[in-house]
Image (cartoon, rainbow, N blue to C red):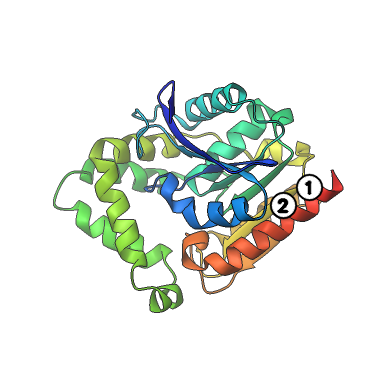
Amino acid sequence: MNRKGLFYKDDGKGHPVLFLHAFPLDLTMWDNTVDACVTAGYRAVRIDLPGFGNSRGPMVSIAAAAEEVAALVRALVLEKPFVCGLSMGGYVAFELLRIVPGLFSGAILCDTNAAADSPGKRADRLATIEMAGTDQFADFVDGFVETLLSPRAIAGNPELPFIIRTGFERAGPKAISAAQRAMANRRSSEDILPGIRIPVLLMFGEDDPMKDAGADIQNAVEGAEFRLVQNAGHFSNLENPADFNQAFLDFLNRVTIDE
């Protein structure tokens, strides 16, 4: 379904959970977790962020994407949803917690970072924009897959690199460039962390190069829980869905009961 440019899928009944996908994928990356949520009695809303999947684009900024998502949450009358974002989806989730902090009852932040890009990381993203659509881009994709996917996860599921590579192909150079620029220019969310007063679960693949960022977030958010997903890298929900989904639902069930 589309609403004002954003494509979304709305499944199940019960307490709502909002899912925000990683770069360079789309809402289909959450299919397995959504099935588990719906079976457990939750309503699951997945969104294609601007420029990805079936949503119009390009992505102007992380802040602008968050505004669009907040408008959709209001339009769908999602009452106190949980928000779950992985990587780029986590950046959007942090912006949502900044601009509409009272909208959510809990947050699951996965394989993401509250800090802004370092100068070196920002330069790398901008260099990627120059490569998008050229023969050089294949080398970037190879490095992306090699760095961010766990070799142990690939051994158990050889299709994982194909899923990520297909994500790049489906997104295309325009969406890739816009998203990289938006991520490179995003502001730090570190300033809002001490003020977060909802339950927070942090999930990171044990082989994710970004997992130290999860520990930093945990230290800044009072009461935040931290869970390492075994045999997984940066795309933890895809690399070990059984471990991810179990921790995810344990958190949802516990927090929902305590409300």
Q: What residue type is labelled 2?
A: Leu
- Check disc 1 and report its element: helix, strand or loop: helix
Q: Residue at x 35, y 40 (%)?
A: 53
Who is closer to the viewer here, 243 or 145? 243
> Residue 4: which numbered mark, if any?
none
Q: On the image, numbered disc 1 is attached to which residue?
A: 256
Q: Where is residue 58 in the image (x, y as percent from the top left)?
A: 34, 29
Q: Height in image: 238 above or below 113? A: below
Where does the image place residue 246, in percent across and percent down from the top left? 65, 64
Tags 2 and 1 touching, CB below 8 Å: yes
Q: Residue at x 37, y 40 (%)?
A: 180
User: In this view of the protein, which residue sits in the foreground, 207 or 124?
Assistant: 207
Would you call the spot at circle 2 few (<14 residues within 10 Å), some (14-19), or many (20 or more)?
many
Pick the quarter of the image with the C terminus. top right
Residue of label 2:
252
The residues bearing labels 2 and 1 have C-alpha atoms spaced at a distance of 6 Å
Q: Within 10 Å of the Cα at label 1, are there few (<14), some (14-19), or many (20+) other Cα atoms?
A: few
Q: Percent x, y for residue 244?
A: 59, 63
Instruction: Pinpoint residue 104: horizontal percent, then vertical percent.
Output: 70, 35
On the rendered structure, is 150 left or right of 101? left
In-front residue for pair 21/258? 258
Query: Residue sitting at 61 percent across and 32 percent down?
Result: 96
Report which quarter residue 130 is drawn in. top left
- Above or below residue 28? Residue 104 is above
Task: Decide if residue 84 is in sight here.
Answer: yes
